[in-house]
Amino acid sequence: MRIAMLTNNYKPFVGGVPISIERLAKGLRSLGHEVYIFAPSYEGQEDEPYVIRYRSRKKKLKGEFVIPDILDKTIEEKFAAVPFDIIHVHHPMLMGYIAQYLHKKYDIPIVFTYHTRYEQYLHYLKPYDFVQKIYLRNSDNRLRSMSHNIIYSGGQKLVAVHNRIFTNLCSMVFAPTESMKQYLIDNGTCTNIEVVPTGINAEDFNYDEKTAEKIRSGYIGDNKFLLCSVSRLEREKNISFMLEGLALLKKRRGGCFRLLLIGDGSQKEELMSEAEMLDLTDNVIFTGCIEHSQMRNYYRACDVFVFASRSETQGIVLLEAMAAGLPVVAVEASGVNDVVTDGWNGYKTEPSVSDWKKKLEIILDDAELRNRMRQNAEKRAKEYLSSNIAKKVEKLYQSLLYEKNMERVYENRII
């Protein structure tokens, strides 16, 4: 099969969607399929075979996300040059519109992966960012409620309606978890939805103990525990929540820990100031981005993976951490519920700082529990190998092509 994958973002941008696309493409290519990725242009990008770059606009959302130039003629010119069998789009907006146009014009089945809770990213748009700041800072409850219900909640509902319409124009929809499948059904998606999680690579299990120990000794200092978290440093990742929880832990237990906060983003300076205000300067280390090939060693160097984001459809970093044997303490959310079994390979907590701190403390206090959770974490991660995910997607693509061929046979008979 020849597959066209269309995306609003890709490498060198660091994020869950580019990782998901790259792994699925790699898995499908290993099965003998041709996969072309239509991706925006970035400064400093590397040329890759089968990656077709189209123009990006100069302006970026919050200085981070490039805005695709969907009017770039290169997209259709390159698309028309290859007899594609499947269109697989990874966003409902911008390139999603181009994917629908190509789907209708060339009569090719279209698959959409619902990667992100888009309504939780409205703050990247200036009007909604302004409203959310009013909501968070205004002491007048009536004004808070009015600004939130009229504008911000209205925007969330509009996004939900948009996505319902988009998914129902697709041939098939992939949801990364069962909970996300149910969310789409509840939102009114009638198109067939299949659960297709982002896989993790076999290499993610191959950490180097010596390198991990060197990383641990380099960061832990005189502390007893080394924690880590991996995410973009942005508001939707809820990192302030973790800092508050760690501040409570420090008040109760003293500075017995250090957190490696791996990643970068527009909130870095703000979060560093917050850590200083909470007396966590010596306890929280902002490492910046780490090369992905080294991440497994960083995970292995730590004792627990901590997480508080509620915007994930599937927490890829949770599985990568589990592959290195890390138990997880995370706030209960759609991307967490499907991979963390409470009390087995980690803890899911209420969106309460004190509850999150309490569950983290339980793991830190019980070495036997921590070791048992480590083993269970690795078991869970092995269920999500990319090679198995690619085989499932291959069969789903083939089912769409079979249905398409049957429709054509039926139409020919009628004519």
Image: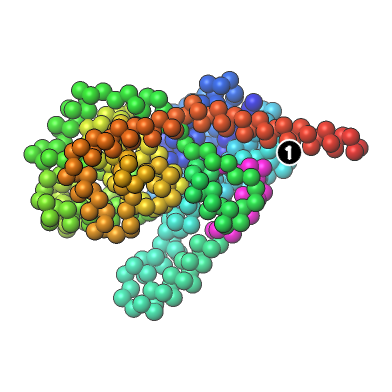
User: Which quadrant would residue 415 be assigned to in this image?
Assistant: top right
Region of the chain picked out in magenta, as a range: 159-174
* Residue at the outermost right position: 415
Q: Is residue 296 above or below residue 56?
A: above
Classify 10 Å Cα crowding around label 1: few (below 14), some (14-19), many (20 and above): few
- The front one of 365 and 60 is 365
Residue picked out by circle 1 = 107
User: Which quadrant would residue 12 be assigned to in this image?
Assistant: top left
User: Which quadrant would residue 368 be assigned to in this image?
Assistant: top left
Q: What residue type is labelled 1?
A: Asp
- The front one of 130 and 373 is 373
On the image, the x and y values in percent for residue 401 come to 70, 32
Q: In this view, does 226 lie above or below 234?
A: above
Instruction: Please say which color scheme the image uses.
Output: rainbow
**Image point (26%, 23%), residue name:** 208
- The front one of 90 and 180 is 180
Q: What element carries label 1?
A: loop
Does residue 288 belong to the magenta stretch? no
Q: Is residue 290 visible?
A: no
Q: In this view, does 364 lie above or below 380?
A: below
On the image, the x and y values in percent for residue 10 come to 47, 37
**Image point (50%, 42%), residue name:** 176
- The front one of 413 and 382 is 382
On the image, the x and y values in percent for residue 62 come to 40, 52
Quarter of the picture holding the N terminus: top right
**Image point (34%, 47%), residue name:** 342
On the image, the x and y values in percent for residue 43 come to 42, 36
Going by the image, does 314 lie left or right of 405? left
**Image point (54%, 41%), residue name:** 195
Q: Can residue 305 be seen in this view?
A: yes
Going by the image, does 175 lie left or right of 333? right
